[in-house]
Amino acid sequence: MLVKCPHCQKFNRLPTERLSEKPNCGACKSSLLAGPIEADQASFQEILRTSKLPVIVDFWAPWCGPCKMFAPTFQASAIKHGEKILHVKLDTEANPAIGQQYNIRSIPTLAIFKNGSEVERISGALPPAQLEQLISKII
């Protein structure tokens, strides 16, 4: 899969099984997990299947106002906790089959997965303190 470096914006080819190994950017050597991973139809299931770390998924859409307001909170959480829990963003507009598969009825919706199975779900844009509580409960 291709992962965009959150620091220098260069794309890095990264096998999904290496996501749990704290990978660094080939260009700037910064952590590739210090920001959300943008998943698509092809990479989403692979991330869930191969990740040894818990995965928090932000199901969102570009036209959604609350999703846009929540994005900086999710980004800050990824910077803070990126090496303990994978932060993944999935655009439900571009990937409707995944939204249907996981029965996403409102956005933003956060789903937490461990070992490929969903363990928790919360709908709505969370304030930073509430997201922090959720993540501290998982890691």
Image (spheres, rainbow, N blue to C red):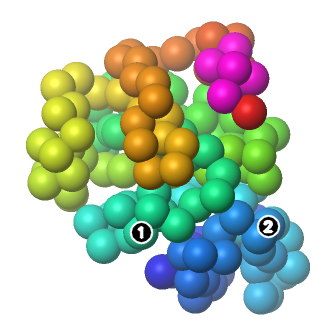
User: In this picture, is 97 found above or below 64?
Assistant: below
Task: Residue at 61%, 45% (x, y): give it.
Answer: 54
User: In this picture, is 121 found above or below 9?
Assistant: above
User: In this picture, is 106 found above or below 43?
Assistant: above
Q: Earlier in the sequence, mark 1 or mark 2?
A: 2
Residue 96, percent from left and from top:
14, 51
User: Is residue 134 or residue 5 the one in the foreground?
Assistant: 134
User: Which residue in the structure is indicated by mark 2?
Assistant: 22
Residue 26, percent from left and from top:
77, 88
Asked whether 135 falls inside the magenta stretch, the response is yes
Where is residue 85, by image quadrant? top right
Mark 2 Cα shell of 10 Å, populated few (<14), some (14-19), many (≥20) = few
Where is residue 17, by image quadrant? bottom right
The kind of secondary structure the magenta stretch mainly shows is helix
Mark 1 Cα shell of 10 Å, populated few (<14), some (14-19), many (≥20) = some
Q: Secondary structure at mark 1?
A: helix
Nearer the observer, disc 1 or disc 2? 1
97 vs 34, left or right, is left
Residue 89, percent from left and from top:
45, 49
User: Which residue in the structure is indicated by mark 1?
Assistant: 46
Amino acid beneath label 1: Glu
User: In this picture, is 48 found above or below 22?
Assistant: above
* Region in magenta: 133-138
